[in-house]
Every structure is written in C-alpha cells, then in structure tokens.
Amino acid sequence: MFSSAQPASSSTLLNSVQLLFDLQDVNAIGQSISGCLDPEDIAHRVTEALVERFQCAFARIWLTDQDQQALTLVASSGLYTHTNGSFAHVPMGAYKVGKIAQNRVPFLSNYLPDETWVKDRDWAIAKGIQGFAGYPLMAGDRVLGVLAAFSHEALAPEFLEVLQMLCLTTTIALDAALQSRKAIPQVVLQNEARVLSDQLAKVLTSTQLMLVGTERDLPASTAYALLRGVEVLTQLDCSYCRLTYDDMAVSLDAIAIFPPNTSNDKPASFFSELQLMTLWLGGALSVQPDPKDRVFELTLTLPYVPEPEHLSVSVQCQQSVLQMAFTHLCLKAGLSLSNTPPPSQDDSRTKAVLLTDRLNIPTSPWPIIWIQHSHRGQVPIAAQAVVTLDILPQQLYAVVAQVAKGQAAQTLPSLAPVLSEREQEIMQLLSQGFRDRDIAKQLHISESTVRFHVNNTLTKLKAKNRYQAVYEATSREWI
C-alpha cells in the first residue's frame, strides 16, 4: 500500500515489457548479494544498483540500531555518497524515514517539492527531484531498516512493483547477515571454531540434539538456514531433533507441536521464510502433520554444493496479467528470466525453458511449459508440461527442472489440483471444527453430499485423512 498527497493517475497502465526487463535486473541484484554476510556491503550494492540500473538520482538505506530507537545511514549512492550528513542518524518516528520505520507503511510521492514534510523545498526544486519512494525493510514483525529512492522524474507504476520485489530480496539478505553477525562472531574472536551442532544445541531448549555422521564445514548461508530452522522449532515446542551429515547433503529432522490456534494462523506461515531460504540454497523442506494430533514432522535437507546447472525461463504470455503474475512467480521460485536461449544448450550449463499461455506455440529451441488458464483449453501438442494458475513457487521450480532435463511427460498433469468452491467451503468449516451434520445444516445440503465432497477433496490432495486435507488446503492458501 502507498500513501501520497498527490497520487499518480490511476489510468496509467503497467508496461509489462519494461517490468520484465526490470525484474531481470532485480534477479541479478539478488544474485549479487546472495551469500553476502556484510550488511553494509549488501546495502551499498543495492543502492548502487538502484542508481546504475534504474536511473535513480540517489538511493539510501538506513538500518535500525540495536535498541530500535534510531536509524543509521549505512549506504548512499548517486547524487550523495556520504553517510555522515544531517540524516546520518534519524530517531525512530522523526522525518519521513523515521515515520516509515515506525509506522511500517511504504510511502510514494511523485511531487516531492510539494510535500509538507520535505525539510528543504528549495533543495528539491534546485536538484530537480520529483519522485520519492520509501519502503520499510521488514523481516516478519521486525523492522531492519528503510530503503529510499529519489528520482528526477515521476516514478512509473512498474518501477514500484520492481522496488517492492527488490525490498523483499534485500530484507532476506540483510536479515541473514545481521543474524549471522549476532550468532557466530564471539567464537571467532576466541580463535575457537564452534561446530554447527554446538550452535544448534545452544538454541534448543526443550530437547537434546542428536548428531549423526561426521561434521564438516558448511557455507555460512547453509549454517544460517539450519539455525533459523531450529529457532522456529523451538518456538513450536520441539520434542525431537537430529542433525545428519550424509555424503551429499546435511539434513535436519525434527518432531514438534503446532500451537492450539494453528488452524486459524495457518501452519505454513511458520515456515514461509525458511521455505524461501531453502529454495535459494537448492534444498528441500518437508512438513508432514500427524493425523492424530497437532504434532508434525519436519525434514530440512540442504546440499553441500549447489546444483551446477542454472535454470532459466522465458515468460511469453499473450495475457499481460499472466505475463506479470508468472514473472513474479519465477523470481519467487529462484529462477532466472531470459529472452534469448544460450548458443548451444548441449554445451551450456544453463537450462532454459519457455513458459507460455499461447495455444499456437511457434517453433522454439526451448522445451515448453504451457499455462492452462481455462478448463476448456486443449493442451498444445508442442507442450512438454502443463501448469495451472494456482501452482506454488517450489512446484514451478520442480517442473522447470524436470522439463529442462527432458524428464517431463508429454501430458504432465497439473501439480496443483483445484478445489471447487463447495469443496473449499467444506474444508473451511472443517478447519473450524464443524462436524458433517453441522456443515450440512449450514450449507443446506445432505450429510452424504458433505461426505462426497470431502472424499473428492482427499483424492485431489492425496491426503490420507481430513486432518491432512485441511492442512494441505491451508498451506496452499485455498482456505
């Protein structure tokens, strides 16, 4: 959401072509800061990229101090590169930057000189600064800092979409760097390398960690992901935890209990950040609920060495809304965007795939994944796989990887079955504790019809029982 004294015209349409190229730049920026554990370096790379790639007049990033009472300017690029001026330290709630951090509300203005909060209106006019966008860098309910971009021209609608994605990428990288700085450093100062199992055992409070296999040095990003996993488990009352070093990967297996109000809070929300980190590291995260209770089993597997191949996707949709939606989805899945195939896919480590909604697909050197957006649409013969509109990022990544390797069937079924409106209604009521009789009464249908829809849902979700079906439907945000 945005607020502005004079908002831009709502008639302005998004330029989907420009958005595609801009999101490719965001992906490149994300790759440049991935694995970096220096917060100031991350911030500097991001502000430099905003100036160089997006022609901002200047860009700045402030980080919150440890006491959460002030913000410190750590990076400034473009028109101003110093970090020791009058805005080097901003109290929480002061000026626009401090208010953005305090209220956690992004702010946009394309008429900066006319804003009443601008400290020096003559400066804005003299420098020709017209556009301003400020975003809080949020990790969960924590404010890590604020990103601000200034431009000579009005900010285009597609740039605001891009800036939102960039802030998400920046926040994840900054959070990993800041947490790493807190968790690991004292051991280094003592010249005594503490192994990962010692760090995990210190975090665990409700159970004893089991270690299987010989420990080895891990990349800081991998170790941080495992630490974050254990922190989440501790919040959920972990009763069993095992760290295993195999030949190809390190894995964390655990058993824990969801809080009593899990059905309302959506269990998947506990692991959303961990899921994204796992995806970036080329690993796998599995959370399986126990049908008997709120108990669940978690398995987090991270490879020692990332996959050598690089998955690239060209999104070419006729419908602009699908073009934007699947461009965002590809970036969220950790896929790169491309418009031209590599010179020779046989010799290149880059695996490229075409993602399209077109019925008449032109000849393409790339394997093709078709987006089915209508139940009446017939699958094109040229398509190697089919995906639907409700596919999840990790599912899309798996399909792209499968097709890129030539392992997908000619008519691959949808990986994300769709529940009907009636089935979603029944799942919603089941999640609230209603019985078949109560559901039938509320929906004005028979109990046998309720059972029919429940059984149909179990089949679609491949669930063994109602509890697992409710969990799957909730985790996919269908209810």
Image (spheres, rainbow, N blue to C red):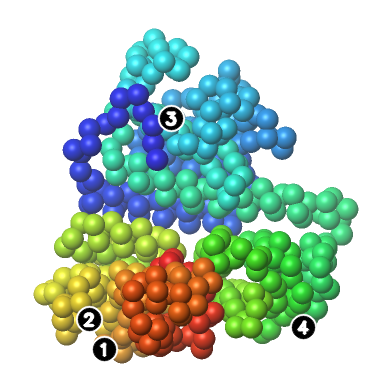
Observer-nearest of 333 and 426: 426
Residue 46, position as x, y percentages in the image: 49, 43
Left or right of residue 338, residue 37 in this image: right
Where does label 4 land, which residue? 213
Q: Are marks 1 and 4 in contact (CB under 8 Å)?
A: no
Where does label 3 land, which residue? 58
Instruction: Choose the circle earlier in sequence order: 3 or 1.
Output: 3
Where does label 1 land, which residue? 410
Residue at left offset 52%, top offset 86%: 465
Quarter holding the C terminus is bottom left
What amino acid is labelled 1 in the image? Gln
Residue at left offset 83%, top offset 51%: 186
Relative to 265, residue 62 above or below? above
Q: Is residue 418 at all visible to an observer of this figure?
A: no
What amino acid is labelled 3 in the image? Phe
Q: Are marks 2 and 3 in contact (CB under 8 Å)?
A: no
Where does label 2 land, which residue? 383
Q: Are marks 1 and 2 in contact (CB under 8 Å)?
A: yes
